[in-house]
Amino acid sequence: MAKVSVIIPTYNRAHLVSRAIKSVLNQNFQDFEIIVVDDGSTDNTEEVIKSFKDKRIRYIRHEINKGGNAARNTGLKNSRGEYIAFLDSDDEWLPEKLERQLEIFEKSQDEKLGFVYCGVIFINKKENKELRFLPKVKGYVYKNMLADNITFGGSDNLIKKEVFNICGFFDECEELKKRGAQEYEMWIRIAQKFNFTFVKEYLVKYYTDPIDKITTIATLQDKARAREYIVNKFIEEYKKIPKILSDKLRRMGTLYCLGGNIKKGRVLFLKSIRYNFFNIVSYFCLLISLFGASFYNEIFSLKIVINIKPFKQKG
């Protein structure tokens, strides 16, 4: 039995997964198990994993590629820890990560606390850029989470295992499989029943430039479909907060327009206006969509239209 089960889903990242594993082995807190779920890799991922001789590392392989959420669920089903931490195989933790988050859980008097996240560093080596984000929202964050993913991806969390006994496992639907926003749907369900808090320190490094990152290879329309799936799944909840629903519809509309589907984008802009007649940005988006996809992309490149956070959501 380990205190923490670290679940690392991976697919064809033999060149990166060692860095992730080493960052766990280098943690100040050492009472953990590492479950690496190989989601049908065709490279030498298995060889790389088995080159580590630490008995705390377990390797599980899917014979076919099932998607990141299926890999996370396999890890959950095989976990033995009291707490769960997910680490994407192209990211890494700083040594204090688990220690700081466990301290929060152990000192908390909040029986509903189920999720602790932390600050992150986004690194783009190709452009030699580094962005840092600290968390700001805690407590009962359900409404905040419906509005946007308040976490910074899939590697900044520590979660009580009992949370999954109550909220269920990750959604393995096709819309989320390779579209980005994979964890977001799960975090919404957790936020509905448990409280969130954070460590206000930079404890995770996200690398945004590898060409195999899901949010890089997914098309804009695929991303839009993933977010549309999530909104539809929680539509009755969203209808209770029409301003947030209006903004979500506008953002989806912009993704469709940027992906070339102007007609679908316009439909969503009109729906956005219907839920909030005072959403001025939606009127503007609808207007410029009348001039076609190329013009919409040109205006968007000036960062006038919508605040999409390109560095925020990895998963």
Image (tube, rainbow, N blue to C red):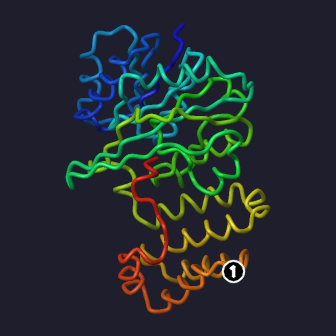
Side of 149 relative to 217 (left or right)? right
Residue depicted at x 47% and y 39%: 154
Side of 214 relative to 117 (left or right)? left
Please say if 12 is above or below 103: below
Label count reads 1
Q: Position of residue 38 (x, y in %)?
A: 38, 30
Q: Quadrant of residue 146?
A: bottom right
Residue in front for this viewpoint, 57 or 153? 153
Residue depicted at x 71% and y 55%: 234
Quadrant containing the N terminus is: top right
Residue on which the image places disc 1: 278
Task: Kindly identify the amino acid type of the residue bearing the numbered disc 1.
Answer: Phe
Side of 95 relative to 4 (left or right)? left
Residue depicted at x 41% and y 23%: 96
Residue in front for this viewpoint, 143 or 65? 143
Please say if 52 is above or below 134: above
